[in-house]
Amino acid sequence: MAIFERDVLENRRRRTAKAFGRQAPTVLIGAGEPIPIPGGLDQTYPFKAHPEYYWLTGSQRSGGVLAYNQQEGWTHFVRPVTPSERLWEGNPDAPEGEDVAGLSEWLTRYAGPEIAVLGSPVPDVKSEEELAVEMRERLDTVRRRKDSAEIELLGRAVKATAAGHARANEVIRPGISERHIQIELEAEMFRQGADAVGYGTIVGVGSHAAVLHFEPGDRIVNTDDLVLIDAGGAISGYTADVTRTYPAEDRFTPRQQAIYDIVLAAEAEGISKCRVGTEWHDVHRAAAAVLAQGLRDLGILKGEVEGLLDSGAIALFFPHGIGHMTGLGVRDVGGHAPGRGEVQPCCGVRVRIDFPLEENFLMTVEPGIYFVPAILDDPAKRERFRDSVDWKSLDDWRSVGGVRIEDNVLITASGPRVITEEIPK
Ligand code: GLY
Ligand code: MN
Ligand code: MN
């Protein structure tokens, strides 16, 4: 069954061709090939088509190539279904198109001397890398704006995600394990329509909440533990990316509450900045300023807020970017605006994204405060930030572990729209 209607794909291709411009070379966009599992004989890792290919074709089948040149427009080459596939996999969805065996003849006939390969590499085709970088930047500018078909899929992914988080919230109690919470959460997401998890579910109890991409294990929730859950259900490749931090029982301890309130205020500040034209680095800085002020008020950080941001002291507790694009995969598109070069650090961290916001961008906003031993016990950092932290009173806070709150925000002409707001926090 087609994931995207024909007119959705035609619209995407039309806008992409326009962005490629009148001087465009021949562009090939490869789906990619399954990756063998080392030592696994004929087994492969689960295959996902390259998102550039999937977005323009709606196909998750390997081996395909979408070809473009100005003279011919778009031609979709696909790998025909084999008898062996019918035996082992049933009837895989194969998109309509030309047999990929005809690609080399098409190239001989239509391609000029220079070809830009996007998506995954195409066997036996040499890509002009500078051209490919430029064409990818042009494609990115089109892909960043979510269209209505994507927003509809994301709405369904959010519903499944909300159900999963609600179930997790129900089952969290002292004595339950991270694994048990993960099982209940994921099962509920699948029950409510998810066809995959969008990324490895994070359930971190106590100090595990301070491990940014923690994988759940057998740790048991104790009475005074926080539980950090970062989970998203996916539908047809589109995923929500949501974090909530819950107390073990009905309420937070006073210290947990103090940290939670700061993170919540930082999130609200970040979200309020999610407007057309705002630089993403300014969203990061605005949220980081709230975190720094809050930690200063608690007596953990010392000095002026601006100085704590410029020196990177805030990154001792907020060591990641404020968010990223999400949607088609948990890390959708990203990068920097054309001509900006490498993404520059901001407030002591490498914020992945460097562009101003536009209408229909979908961003995560996910501030956090973490007490990470690997950072706080690093002698070089303790020396460098000797005067910015009250290192003694900090010890009273470490058992909080970590708090992150993450929502997904659609940028609209009338301001930020939090598409995950139904998930309580
Ligand atoms: N789920 C990983 C992240 O928030 O980026
Ligand atoms: Mn997340
Ligand atoms: Mn995220």
Image (cartoon, rainbow, N blue to C red):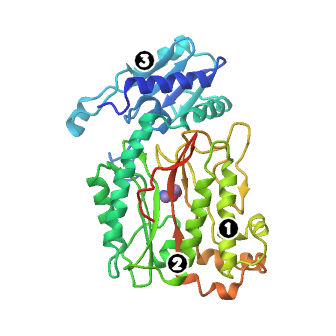
Q: Quadrant of the N terminus?
A: top left
Q: Earlier in the sequence, mark 1 or mark 3?
A: 3
Instruction: Classify residue 395 as left or right of residue 98.
Output: right
Q: Secondary structure at mark 1?
A: helix
Category of crowding for the residue at label 3, using alpha-carbon neighbours closer than 10 angstroms: few (below 14), some (14–19), many (at least 20): few
Q: Which one is in front in this view, the residue at disc 2 or the one at disc 3?
A: 2
- Name above or below for residue 282 compared with residue 259: above
Which of 80 and 336 lies nearest the eye of the viewer? 336
Q: Quadrant of the C terminus?
A: bottom left
| Disc 1 target residue | 315
Assess mark 3: CB under 8 A from ligand 1?
no
Q: Earlier in the sequence, mark 2 or mark 3?
A: 3
Category of crowding for the residue at label 1, using alpha-carbon neighbours closer than 10 angstroms: few (below 14), some (14–19), many (at least 20): many
Q: Are dots 2 and 3 in contact, CB under 8 Å?
A: no
Specify the amino acid type for callout 3: Gly
Instruction: Classify residue 256 as left or right of residue 338.
Output: left
Q: Residue 14 appears at what percent x and percent y?
A: 52, 21
User: Which residue shows up at 58% across the image and 31% down it?
Assistant: 139
Q: Are dots 1 and 2 in contact, CB under 8 Å?
A: no
| Disc 3 target residue | 102
* Quarter of the figure with residue 272: bottom right
Q: Secondary structure at mark 3?
A: helix
User: Which residue shows up at 49% across the image and 19% down it?
Assistant: 74
Which of 347 and 91 lies nearest the eye of the viewer? 347
Q: Residue 179 appears at what percent x and percent y?
A: 34, 70
Q: Earlier in the sequence, mark 1 or mark 2?
A: 2
- Name above or below for residue 287 compared with residue 176: above
User: Which residue shows up at 41% across the image and 55% down it?
Assistant: 232
Q: Which one is in front in this view, the residue at disc 1 or the one at disc 3?
A: 1
Q: Residue 213 appears at what percent x and percent y?
A: 50, 64
| Disc 2 target residue | 257
Give the residue furthest to the front.
414
